[in-house]
Image (cartoon, helix red, strand yellow):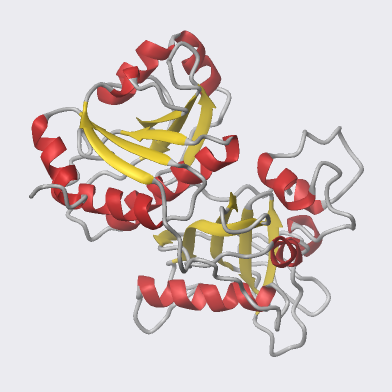
Amino acid sequence: MAEEPSDEGGEANGGSDGPERPPPSLFSMALWGPEGPPERVFGRNDWGSCSEGDTHDDHCLCVSPIRAPVTIPPPEMILSREEMQEIAKGYRPIDMNDKWLAFMEDNRLFLHRSWTGYGIYEVTFAAKGFSWTDETGFMPTSARVESDPRRYSPEEFDPIGERDFLRDLIVHVSGEPIPISLPIVGYSGPTIEAVLGDITAEDVDAIVNPANTRLSYGGGVNGAIHKAAGPELLAHCKTLGGCPVGRAKVTPGYWLDARWVIHTVTPQWRGGNRGEPVLLESCYREALARADEVGAQSVAFPALATGAHGYPLKEAARIAVNMVRWTPTDVQSIRFVCFDNRTLRAFQSALGQDE
């Protein structure tokens, strides 16, 4: 499971008291510019925080985080900067019939029930630039929903239905009737190839590392990347606070030819019925989002999750190709670097190159 959200307010809380604020993140810079938001925005601290057993009334809106998060596919949507800014300002219930409140902490949107304060959805966004427009777009890269039946109990759990409902909910908190932009038609995508080779020797802008949740030195491809990059990579990773499954973080490449290393934590294969496909899809979306954030034009992936994590090779290759082919990104060139001929054949087949 991914980590529980922190109860500490992020820079979206907009307070000026207390210790010096950290420098803005890449996402914040893309959303607000270097000066930050032009007006105060609502954050977690504005709603208060509740402990188990606390009561809720009209005079105190309290929130508590998701207790049992389950990963679902993120909505396929792209928001303009203006739409994203409206969401980032926070959303209060309009009247007693409005069931939702919302706030953001950096690039994470939290959606809570207005009467109970229970967290139901969390969505991570990434700033994306597109070749068909000069504007920056913002798209969801991962999403989670509450699975504790005492807090949220749909008649039947349906990940696709949850995704579609979440999309409508994001439209709602963006300030209806602002239209949601979906400039995906006509997207051509990067060039994609599969090759046999050693990912540590790839001369690309970024390589992707199948990391562990601690972002520590491990075995397999992870160990080879750390060894080739030098001890500085591990020292940098120790400052990042780990990484949950399905997410990604970026560091410099140090001694590698690649300028950047994008670390993503892949799911352990447990039969395919515990969210593994959604989490693996998220690894590719998140990796491309991090590549866009640092301006990487070329990215090399290994066959994520197919080693010690045991993901079936054919299905992993299909997911990999589909995700990099259809995820909007500024990356121009993507290379799957395969360890052996069996892996190469699987990726060539997924690419339609096995004639």
- The answer to whether residue 279 is seen in the rendering is no
Front residue of 150/135: it is 135
Q: Where does residue 279 sit, x and y in percent of width and height?
A: 36, 52
Left or right: residue 5 versus residue 333 is right
Q: Where does residue 280 sit, x and y in percent of width and height?
A: 33, 49
Q: Where 8 falls versus 73 (above or below)?
A: above
Picture residue at 92% right of the left edge, 42% below the top: 17
Report how many numbered discs are placed on residues in the image. Answer: 0
Picture residue at 13% right of the left edge, 28% below the top: 340
Picture residue at 55% right of the left edge, 61% below the top: 122
Q: Where 327 falls versus 293 (above or below)?
A: below
Q: Residue furthest bottom?
A: 97
Q: Where does residue 237 sit, x and y in percent of width and height?
A: 51, 23
Front residue of 270/123: it is 123
Q: Where 199 falls versus 127 (above or below)?
A: above
- The answer to whether residue 179 is seen in the rendering is yes
Which quarter of the picture shows residue 200? top left
Left or right: residue 139 versus residue 147 is right
Which quarter of the picture shows residue 90? bottom right
Q: Where does residue 309 sit, x and y in percent of width and height?
A: 23, 38
Left or right: residue 121 versus residue 157 is right
Picture residue at 27% right of the left edge, 58% below the top: 274
Q: Where 327 falls versus 246 (above or below)?
A: below
Which quarter of the picture shows residue 299? top left
